[in-house]
């Protein structure tokens, strides 16, 4: 229940920030979220924020970092970091953004 409320709070903050943020740099992500908050999200949560397919994101994470574990869209990013590879949340943001942009180009 606490995790659900936390995720909902993050989604609300991101939605509000997205409506009011002015992008000053070309390298900004379409979703703004702090790395410390991002670590607590599942792959599905991240995919939902970026409006991308969670399985595509998961496959990208596994391929990018040569992961060997058995992960699902419900796996928390911090659990992957603890188990195998200490990727930065910024790397996941970049990957999610890349997937989103590829999807927009294919429309």
Image (cartoon, helix red, strand yellow):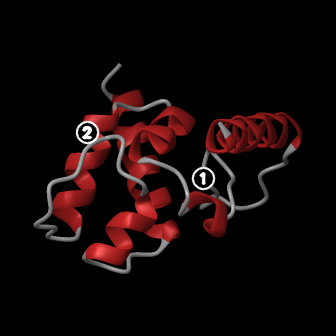
Residue located 42% across and 60% down the image: 77
Assess disc 2: are there few (<14), some (14-19) or many (≥20) residues with their C-alpha within 10 Å of its C-alpha.
some
**Quarter holding residue 54:** top left
Judged left or right of residue 44, residue 66 is left
Q: Is residue 18 above or below residue 28?
A: above
For the C terminus, the image quarter is top left
Callout 2 secondary element: helix
User: What distance separates the C-alpha of mark 2 from that of mark 1?
Assistant: 18 Å
The percent position of residue 30, horizontal first and vertical second, equals 62, 44
Q: Is residue 67 above or below residue 5?
A: below
Which residue position holds label 2? 56
Assess disc 1: are there few (<14), some (14-19) or many (≥20) residues with their C-alpha within 10 Å of its C-alpha.
some
Callout 1 secondary element: loop
For the N terminus, the image quarter is top right
Q: Is residue 84 above or below residue 68?
A: below
Furthest-top residue in this view: 107
The percent position of residue 101, horizontal first and vertical second, equals 42, 40
**Quarter holding residue 18:** top right
Give the foreground label among 2 and 1: 2
Judged left or right of residue 107, residue 40 is right
Furthest-right residue in this view: 20
Number of the label disc, if any, that sits on residue 29: 1
The percent position of residue 74, horizontal first and vertical second, equals 36, 42
Number of the label disc, if any, that sits on residue 70: none
**Quarter holding residue 82:** bottom left
The percent position of residue 35, horizontal first and vertical second, equals 62, 67
Residue located 27% across and 47% down the image: 58
């Amino acid at each position: 229940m606490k995790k659900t409320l936390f995720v909902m709070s993050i989604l609300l903050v991101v939605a509000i920030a997205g409506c009011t943020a002015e992008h000053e740099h070309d390298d900004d992500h379409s979703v703004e979220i702090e790395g410390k908050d991002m670590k607590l999200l599942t792959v599905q949560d991240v995919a939902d924020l970026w409006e991308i397919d969670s399985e595509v994101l998961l496959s990208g994470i596994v391929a990018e970092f040569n992961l060997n574990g058995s992960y699902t869209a419900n796996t928390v990013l911090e659990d992957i970091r603890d188990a195998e590879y200490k990727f930065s949340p910024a790397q996941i943001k970049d990957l999610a953004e890349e997937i989103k942009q590829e999807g927009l180009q294919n429309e």
